[in-house]
Amino acid sequence: MKPIRYIAATLVVAVLFFIFSLPAGKKKSIGGESLSERPLRCVLNLGRFDDSTKALVSGYNYALLKDFASDVSSGMEIITALDTAACYADSLKEGAVDLMVVPVGRCPDSLLCSNEIDGLTNWVLGPENLQGLVELNNWINGFLSSPSYIKMHRKFVLNWLQRRKNQKHQEI
């Protein structure tokens, strides 16, 4: 029994030595890049909403993206998709865009999709950026329980719900 312990201990030491001897750039527990401390390129691609709803949801996500950028100490360039049919999935895969906002449930196959935000949108990352997805979901979960969220939710989402309610009454 003692030889098995010695072999196991030797293997553990060898693996630890190998891990700690890797250059700093090679150590990654999960794949992808951090979203912090670098400028991010984001696309608002909210094609399926009607005009007034699209404006509110776009404004809401624009404000959320700005808060996210501020919290992770990065700058952000936000592009609104003019051609709503353009998916920007290829841009995410190639790294030309870091993040795309889409209506909930519209996450393109093979890309990474964040937790839902108020049942309205998901934020999408490139297919191998697990590190970014973990950071993004941690931020979303923390933000959704913050006082800043309550204020922003009232400003955008409750306004959106009121507009939908008014539109339904006008249709009757």
Image: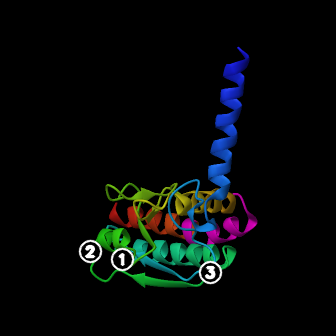
**Mark 1: amino acid:** Asp
Q: Give left or right: position of 50 versus 160.
A: left
In this rendered view, identify the residue nearer to me: 115 or 97.
97
Q: Position of residue 128 (x, y in %)?
A: 43, 59
Q: Amino acid at mark 3?
A: Ser
Task: Please tell me the numbered disc located at residue 13.
Answer: none
Q: Residue at x 55, y 54 (%)?
A: 30
Say if the magenta span includes residue 153. yes
Is label 2 or label 1 in front? 2
**Contact check, label 2 and label 3, Cβ < 8 Å:** no
* Residue 86 numbered tag: 2
Q: Nearer the viewer, mark 1 or mark 3?
A: 3
Q: Quadrant of the C terminus?
A: bottom left
Q: On the image, numbered disc 3 is attached to which residue?
A: 74
Can you give x and y, in whole percent of width and height, for residue 2 in the image?
73, 18
Residue sitting farthest toward the left: 85
Residue placed under numbered mark 1 in the picture: 51
Q: Which residue range is magenta in the image?
A: 145-157
Q: Secondary structure at mark 2?
A: loop
Magenta stretch: residue 23 in it?
no
N-term mark: 2 or 3: 3
Whole-angstrom CA distance, mark 2 to mark 3, is: 26 Å
| Rendering quarter of residue 113 | bottom left
Q: Nearer the viewer, residue 35 or 17?
A: 17
In the image, residue 146 above or below residue 66 = above
